[in-house]
Amino acid sequence: MVSTTYVQFLKGSLLVIFSFILVVMILNRGLKVDMKHEHHKNHELKILGPFKEGTVSDPTALGFANSEVIKSEGIWKAKPFVRVLDSQSKQTSYWKIEKSKSDAGEFYLYETQTILSNLKAGGKPLVNGLPKGKGAQEGDLWAVGSITKLPGNGKETGPLGPLDFIRTIQESEIILWGNDKIKLDDDSTLTIYFPKPTLGKDVLSPGNHPSLKGIRSEKITDKLNFISLMLALFCGTASLPHILIRYYTVKSQSCARNSTVVGISTIGLFYILTLFLGLGAMTSGALDVSDSNMAAPLLARSFGEVMFAMISAIAFTTVLGTVSGLIVAASGAVVHDLLLGFLKIPMKDETKVKAGKISCIFVGIIAIVLGILFQKMNVNYLVGWAFSVAASANLPSLVMLLFWKKTTKEGVICAIIVGMFSSLGWILSCADTFKDVYGLSPESALVPFSQPGIITIPLGFITLVVVSLLTGSKKPSPSL
């Protein structure tokens, strides 16, 4: 236990220190308009236009010599893309139609990236029209992350202070990226990654991120999803088992309070740093458009391989530290709570250690399988779900044991079981899981929104109260 605590302390310290160094490097580099990404493939994002409305099907007017603009029919009618067939290479390129912000009668064409895959046929997917690979004759996604406009139409800012950096971002235009998955007639799937020119003030405005869209949405389900996410993040922090067991390593109440204050202060500082890390990555020209979970290492790579290696090593250490804490908490729960406390199996100390080791193996295998299944999902969604499960399963018991004397052992057990399985069941039945894990239509989801906390946390409290009232006359309240 103590050794894992030291690991957590070391990896946390390194994470904050190197994040601070990376932020200093971001501010020193400043911002510049650069469509040519030298960090990968040396590719320059092509933006064509402006064009007048009515010329969208004219290859000559659009500047595509010796090419054919494919007529938009069927599923393509509702899609904001222009498909251009090159008469020589016979390859099809896809261009995103973006209306001009200054003139409603004009539009631009933005170059896109594509991945064409057919799981039934097998073989390598086609990336940007070529077989997937990193060779000269193979297809690979080029890096993204650009600023198209700076205040005063400047080209480069030079070093900036923290406030000047945010102010400049707010007055700039940034290229974000979205994607659209299209099911074709031959059962293949075409994923189009397209640029989304976005004003900096919209980037910094709250509620524009997909996971926070419920703030501004008119749909009641979106608002409930947002409230549920906030509830899970707030309540789940106090319920994570690998955080709670850290208090077992302190020697006194004052040490526990001091460590809590230091931890909260450090986390607050790190969250401030992540603002600059996110904006720096967004404008670094080094991001992988198909992976939203690699922003920090790829940002570091834009400063050189040494920084990339350091941040990657710290990220790996962070994963190990967190996983070790989770596995220790899980194995301890299996041995002490399940085998000894619930099943009443008598065990010697050696048997306890052996059972704990076996539990670690099984917990690790389950985690690996779940990691593979959910690898395409953004880590923000997964964190929200983890906090929802923790809050639903653990928070009712923690709160009621402290503040309600009629809490019984049976009430605690039932609340944990109901909270855990209801939250997991909700997650496995939501639209995000249907889309990214099952590969099914999100409209087929069995529940109206993705975050379960607003339903499952109160359900855990209700279960504990009801069961405790039904069993309170028979059994005394469990001691702390």
Image: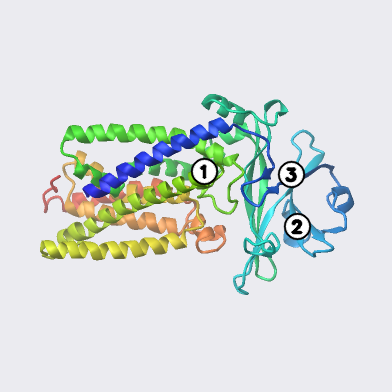
What secondary structure is marked by label 1? helix
Against 198, residue 476 (above or below) is: below
Residue denoted by label 2:
93
Taking depth in this image into account, of 414 and 374 the one nearest to the observer is 374
Residue 101 x, y percent position in the rendering: 74, 35
Q: Is residue 459 visible?
A: no
Q: Nearer the viewer, mark 2 or mark 1?
A: 1
Residue 424 x, y percent position in the rendering: 38, 57
Taking depth in this image into account, of 233 and 66 the one nearest to the observer is 66
Residue 39 x, y percent position in the rendering: 61, 47
Q: Could you tell whether 181 is left or right of 52 in the image?
A: left
Residues tagged 1 and 3 counted as in contact (Cβ below 8 A): no
Residue denoted by label 3:
98
Q: Residues within 10 Å of mark 3 (few under 14, many from 20)?
A: some
Q: Residues within 10 Å of mark 2 (few under 14, many from 20)?
A: some
What secondary structure is marked by label 3? strand
What secondary structure is marked by label 2? strand
Residue 377 x, y percent position in the rendering: 50, 54
Q: CA distance from mark 3 to mark 2?
A: 16 Å
Against 345, residue 266 (above or below) is: above
The residue lying at 52 percent from left, 27 percent from top is 162
| Mark 3 or mark 2: whose residue is earlier in sequence | 2
The residue lying at 21 percent from left, 38 percent from top is 403
Q: CA distance from mark 1 to mark 3?
A: 31 Å
Say which amino acid is labelled 1. Answer: Ala
Residue 45's disc is: none
Taking depth in this image into account, of 131 and 385 the one nearest to the observer is 131
Residue 300's disc is: 1
The residue lying at 54 percent from left, 50 percent from top is 292
Q: Residues within 10 Å of mark 1 (few under 14, many from 20)?
A: many
